[in-house]
Every structure is written in C-alpha cells, then in structure tokens.
Image: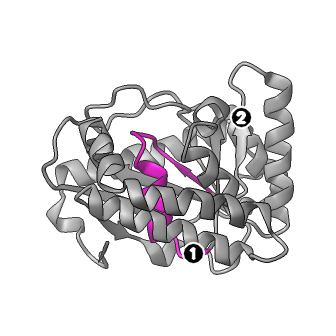
Amino acid sequence: MLRFIYVIIMRIFSIMYFVPKMAHYAKHPEKYSEEDCYKLAQGVIRRVRKTARVTTEYYGTENLPQESGYIMFSNHQGKYDALGIMEGHKKPCSVLMDSKRSNMFIAKQFIDLLKGQRIEKNNPRQQIRVLGNIAKEVEEGRNYLIFPEGGYGKKTDNSLAEFKYGCFYCALKAKCPIVPVVVIDSYKAFGVNSLKKVRTKVIYLPAIPYEEFAHLKAPQLSELVKEKIAAEIEKWENEPNALKEKVKIS
C-alpha cells in the first residue's frame, strides 16, 4: 500500500492529465482505434511501473499466438498483475475485472479505455452474460486476460488459490487458444509496505490450442491450466538461474 500511495503522490499531475485523456479516448471509438487506446494504456502502465520502482522480466513472449483471438489465464497476486502482463503483451488485449474494483477512480477509466468486461461476483446471471460477451469478442479477434482465482487477498508468496472454473466456459464457447500466464513476486509491487526496488516476472507459457482441450469440461480445463501454472512456479522457485533465457526486461 505504501508504494501505491507513493505513486499517487508522485504522479498526481500525470493522473490529472491521463485520467481525462483515457476517458476521452474511451468515449470516442470513432476517433481512436483499439490500437490507439492500448498504446495509451501501455504508456500509463510504463509511468506507473517506473515511479513504483518495479522492474519486470518477461519470458516466453514467443509463445503468444501470432493471430488474435485468444484468452490468457493467469495466477493473481495483486494490483500490479494486469499491468505487468499487459506491458509485455504488445498486441491489444482487454481484461475481465471485478465490478466493484473496476469502478474505482483510475481503474474505471483504465477499464473503459480497454473496453474491458466487469463481473459481479454475486450475480450468476450477469456472470453468464459477461462470459458470453467475452466469448463473442474473442471469436471476433479480441484478446482477453482473466484471473481464475478471482481475488488475491493479502498474498505474501507465490502460492495459488482455488481456480474458479466458471470463467473457462468462455474459452470453450469461443473455441480459442488458451495461454497460461505465470506472475512471480508480483505481490511485492503493491502488497509490501516498502519503497525498495522490486523485480517481478511474467512468463507466457505455450498456448494450448482448442483441439487439445475440446474434450474437457470447464472444471477439468481449469485444473489443467492450474497444474501448468503451479509447475512453472515450482521450477522458478527451485531452479531460477537455469531458466533465465530469452528474457526481456522492462
């Protein structure tokens, strides 16, 4: 929280400039393409990261599908997760976010800019409608980022919480590739009361084509993705130096 407050204070004038700008871009899709909006979002992320004294290493960017229309499923550790993943993901993508959190100041303008989807945790009908919207958009070529754990609580390590399998229905419906994404030490960015420099990692695992999971039901698919993410976290915790290849640092 200390680092988050520090960023707000140090970037107050940037906030006063970029929040209205993000809102303006979001309200005028006839003037600003998805690429324009994503470029603006990445510019905001870059400023936040640098001010927060966070460095992120990216691995496996070559695993991202060349064609658009896929969903990334990532573990969730804190406020920095989506920012870290998106800065390393050069093609436009959007995100599914909890409705309550997504309507807070700055987050609202950011989600509107990305034309993200908001989900109400206690409204099953709304959830079904939103997941259907995501499936339709992915079929039309959009990319999405989803956190199956839902929330992140007060993470103090790289452990995983239970995956909510309902969010995998949209991938089955869209018949699109899935990209498991791993964030490591991301909880340290805004979850530790310190201003010391932080280094996080984002690993894009090989995409899983629809043909490989078409026979699975949502609970089974959820478990498959969770196992892949858990295995990668274990590798990094046990053999960190052996895996540092093809790294891109931001």
Residue that mark 1 sits on: 39
Evaluate if marks 2 and 1 touch, with contact meaning CB atoms under 8 Å apart. no
Q: Please report the residue visible at 58 percent of the width from the left and 65 percent of the height from the top.
A: 207
Q: Foreground residue, 5 or 158?
A: 5
Looking at the image, is mark 2 or mark 1 earlier in the sequence? 1
Residue that mark 2 sits on: 119
Q: Please report the residue visible at 63 percent of the width from the left and 29 percent of the height from the top.
A: 100
User: What residue span does the magenta drawing correspond to?
Assistant: 72-91
**Amino acid marked by disc 2:** Ile
Inspect the magenta stretch and tell me whether residue 165 lies in it. no
Q: Can I make out residue 208 in this image?
A: no
* Model colouring: one colour
Q: Position of residue 204 (x, y in %)?
A: 46, 64
Label 2: how many Cα within 10 Å (few below 14, some 14–19, many 20+) = many
Q: Can I make out residue 221 in this image?
A: yes
Residue 219, placed above or below residue 8: above
Residue 107, placed above or below residue 240: above
**Amino acid marked by disc 1:** Lys
* Position of the C terminus by quadrant: bottom left
* Position of the N terminus by quadrant: top left
Q: Foreground residue, 196 or 214?
A: 196
Work out which residue is located at the far top of the displayed protein and give it. Answer: 122
Q: Please report the residue visible at 54 percent of the width from the left and 47 percent of the height from the top.
A: 106
Q: Position of residue 116 (x, y in %)?
A: 70, 52
Q: Position of residue 73 (x, y in %)?
A: 57, 50
